[in-house]
Amino acid sequence: MSNPKANIYISADELRSIAMEILKKEGVPEGDAFITADCLVKANLRGIDTHGVIRLKVYVDRLRAGGNNPTPHIHVIHESATTAVMDGDNGLGPTGGVRAMEKAIQKAQNCGVGIVTMRHSNHYGTAAFYAMMALEHNMIGVSMTNVLAGMPPTGGRQARIGNNPFAVAFPAGEELPIVFDAATSLSSWGKVFLAAQTGTLLEEDCFLDKDGNPTVKPEDVISGGLLLPIAGYKGYGMALCIGILTGLLADSSFDIDVPHPYKYLDVPGDNSFFMAAIQINQFVPIEQFKKRIDETIRLIKNTPLASNSERIYLPGEKEYIAEREHRAKGIPLNRETVEELRTLAQEAGVSYARREAMLCRN
């Protein structure tokens, strides 16, 4: 979530603009640069700083090293009326993810449901970004990806599976949509990298070092450590299922064969995606469904509170609250991230006056 110590603020439009300029300098076409910048900035807007513009530097580093293709030929390998397998041609993950979900939505509009897998892509940011695309069409959206192996199976001491994330988005009527987005580990790689950048410690009981000992030091995790799955064997099982639905169903790499995007900058990421869109009208009238979603939300939120609780939140509600605040006040960025952006902007040829005006607001 957002760093409470952050004291430099920037509007979403300005942050998106400068991220686009940085990506375009690396040869990314304007449309693809917008998609990727928008994906990262939306994460910051929603308070998920671990998947926001903190990731821009490694995207740029990988473009420069040849690990990512700035101008991919994203294409359909084969398809049916309701399904498709696509190839991301090693392009930026958000570009591939958006193309895959657009294809799923198109098929759902025509046939009621669309399921698309994509092979040969890269890190795609937050899973919710793609699931929420379906909300604009009064559909349910599902998004999954596999990532590098960083978790052991229950009973094991070596990484075999990724902390593979998934998201599901449900449209509502008068209430906010329900948007569940989670990795299958107790914490995330993004939090490890953010802690390393800011010099802070990690949460307890979420990570192991390379020798299998609990640790709160990000450097221990980065240098061969492990993430622990949520709910023990249940999280391990969920991660395995997502790895199968993405890597295997796309006929691509399983988690253990996905290279580390930070360590091997010149190696294609080979992440795979699973996107699904469901046209609700094919099952129940959309307004009736939204009404029942609203009723369900109110039922949940009216649950009597536990003694140590002040409020009940629905999945995605905190992110909507953060987005409302950040649109009004600007997105808070820690100074380390701002310095990275300033350097990247300078290298991209953004004028001194413009980058200082955009990145020096307290």
Image (cartoon, rainbow, N blue to C red):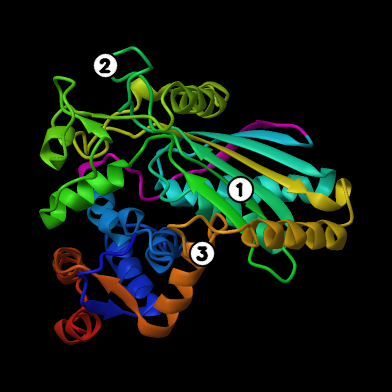
Determine whether, in the image, residue 146 is placed left or right of residue 283.
Answer: left
Q: Nearer the N terminus, badge 1 or badge 2?
A: 1
**Residue at mark 1:** 101
**Residue at mark 3:** 311
CA distance for labels 2 and 3: 39 Å
Q: Nearer the N terminus, badge 2 or badge 3?
A: 2
Q: Residue at x 25, y 82 (%)?
A: 358
2 vs 3, front mark? 3
Q: Amino acid at mark 1?
A: Met
- How many discs appear? 3
**Disc 2, SS:** loop
Quadrant in which the C terminus is drawn: bottom left
CA distance for labels 1 and 2: 33 Å
Residue 158's mark? Answer: 2
Quadrant in which the N terminus is drawn: bottom left
Determine whether, in the image, residue 91 is placed left or right of residue 355.
Answer: right
Determine whether, in the image, residue 217 is placed left or right of residue 82.
Answer: left
1 vs 2, front mark? 2
Whether 67 is among the magenta residues is yes
Whether 170 is among the magenta residues is no
